[in-house]
Image (cartoon, rainbow, N blue to C red):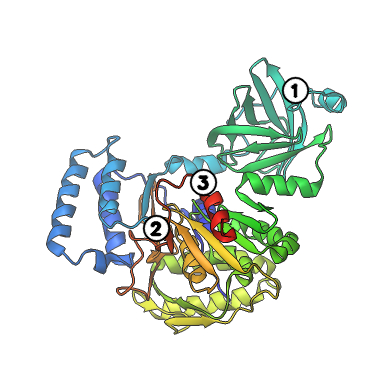
Amino acid sequence: MKIQIFLLFVLSSFFGFVNAQTNCNCNDALQNIILKIESEYPGFAVKTKDQLLYNSFKENTTKSAIENENTSECLAILKSYTDFFKDRHIWVLANENGSQQSINTKTLKNPTSKQANINLKKFKNRASKITNEIEGIWKDENYEIGIEKLNEREYVGFIINADSNFWKTKEVKFRLFTDGTYEYFMQDRSLQKGKYTIHDGGLLYFDTIRSAFTRQTPAASLTQSEIEDKINEMNGFFIKRLTPRTAIVKMQYFSYMFVENIEKMIEKNKALLESSDFLIIDVRDNGGGTDNGYQKILPYVVTGPSRSVGVEYLASPTLISTTEKYLQGLKKDAEKNKAQIEDLENRIRQLKANPGKYVNYDEKKVRIESMVPSVKSPSQIVVLANDHTASAAENFLLLAKQSKKTKILGIPSSGVLDYANAMFFEYGCDNYKLLLPTYKSFRLPDYPIDNIGVQPDIYLDESVKDWTQFAVDYLEGQ
């Protein structure tokens, strides 16, 4: 069974394992990042073969950091160092919560967002009589929210029910403005801004944070199935029939948080997929996530066994500690996750037995996977990919290219695959975050993908304005 410690998990849990709260000056941050990359980045030896060039660059960057000890230029200096490696799985970014994290976690019961001046009993009594599309009672899986109009340009969304460890009743959760923008308080009280939309009078969607609420009172006219489909489409996931012969599957992300949605969507549209002569799979702008994201579509794509080149992980302290943390999360439902737990425990044993060395978990450089093709499936498939198709989505392209009935149309993909499985690394400073990959591919050095991309079978030049229509015409022979 494939298991990945995927980026989204690490992003969401990062603050859970920040222990020290240390703000570093620019040079200290740089030197700590240099030490971490030189010791724990799997691509370091390959990317610094020209030692003279690297050492000269490092020296000049250090001079800049010393000259800009505590200025706003520091982040740019840190990024200039990480950019040397030309690896888009390496990030350095400001931690806006930074040293405030310890304060925030202690003050969540006395939050900084204000209490709404609302008579909750009166609001609930009049909620069913509301006629506009915004006011009322709304819910998602974590919150029950009341929305009331404050003035001609603003609505306030306030807590009715939520986890009492983090929120109080009537506390402001978000503000909606009549120009279509919002301000949204996250659980740590950081403020997110973006645009919202109301769909069919019953679905409220926040674009930047990809969160959706459904209206309970007055009741939404949408069924639960329609709500799920609408949310999926807004997040970039849908399956539609384009013509009597051709269907399209759009998958915007392969992030873990969307895997279940993708699986349900494919199962729900099984009859449509099986009855289509041709299929377009659109993974343009899909930045990747986990390989689990595309497993359910593969039976419609493959025509035989697929070869996957393996990877080897650098047994670093960060990889070990983060894997252990993920394991503890799985153990909360030990029976359901039994196979995953056993696999991760075995991986941790191998990593601890080989500190600083590369570990190939299954001791295979190439895996040949015999996936049974769907009994009924499209006879020809086109996959649309562009220069923002990256990481796990590029893995999907490499598998799709092995199918005898599949062609990749578009332009070369992003080229972010040689060093992957990125996670945040602790390096002694809390005012900046450092993200690094943890493995390197056995494709190297013979078949690099980074900064090159997976090449399309058919290149779509700039004269092709509508890629989807081009794919339909290509498949249907027009």
| Among the 4 quarters of the image, the one containing residue 19 | bottom left
Indicate the secondary structure of the residue bearing disc 3. loop
**Residue 362 placement (x, y as % from top left):** 48, 82
| Mark 2 vs mark 3, CA separation in Å | 17 Å
Q: Residues within 10 Å of mark 2 (few under 14, many from 20)?
A: many
Number of numbered callouts drawn: 3
Q: Nearer the viewer, residue 203 or 475?
A: 475
The kind of residue on which mark 1 rests is Ile
| Mark 2 vs mark 1, CA separation in Å | 55 Å
Asked if residue 57 can be seen in this view, the reply is yes
**Residue 271 placement (x, y as % from top left):** 75, 63
Residue drawn at 33 percent across, 64 percent down: 41
Q: Nearer the viewer, residue 435 or 330?
A: 435
The kind of residue on which mark 2 rests is Pro
The kind of residue on which mark 3 rests is Asp
Q: What label does residue 412 carry, if any? A: 2
Indicate the secondary structure of the residue bearing disc 2. loop
Q: Which residue is mark 3?
A: 466
Residue 103 shown left or right of residue 184 in the figure: left
Residue drawn at 60 percent across, 74 percent down: 341
Q: Nearer the viewer, residue 137 or 255?
A: 255
Report the residue that reaches farthest toward the front.
Answer: 478
Do labels 2 and 3 touch, CB within 8 Å?
Answer: no
Q: Residues within 10 Å of mark 1 (few under 14, many from 20)?
A: some
| Mark 1 vs mark 3, CA separation in Å | 50 Å
Reading the chain from its start, which is encountered first: label 1 or label 3?
Answer: 1
| Among the 4 quarters of the image, the one containing residue 185 | top right
Q: What label does residue 118 carry, if any? A: 1
Q: Quadrant of the C terminus?
A: bottom right
| Among the 4 quarters of the image, the one containing residue 213 | top right
Label 1 or label 3, whichever lies nearer to me, is: 3
Label 2 or label 1, whichever lies nearer to me, is: 2
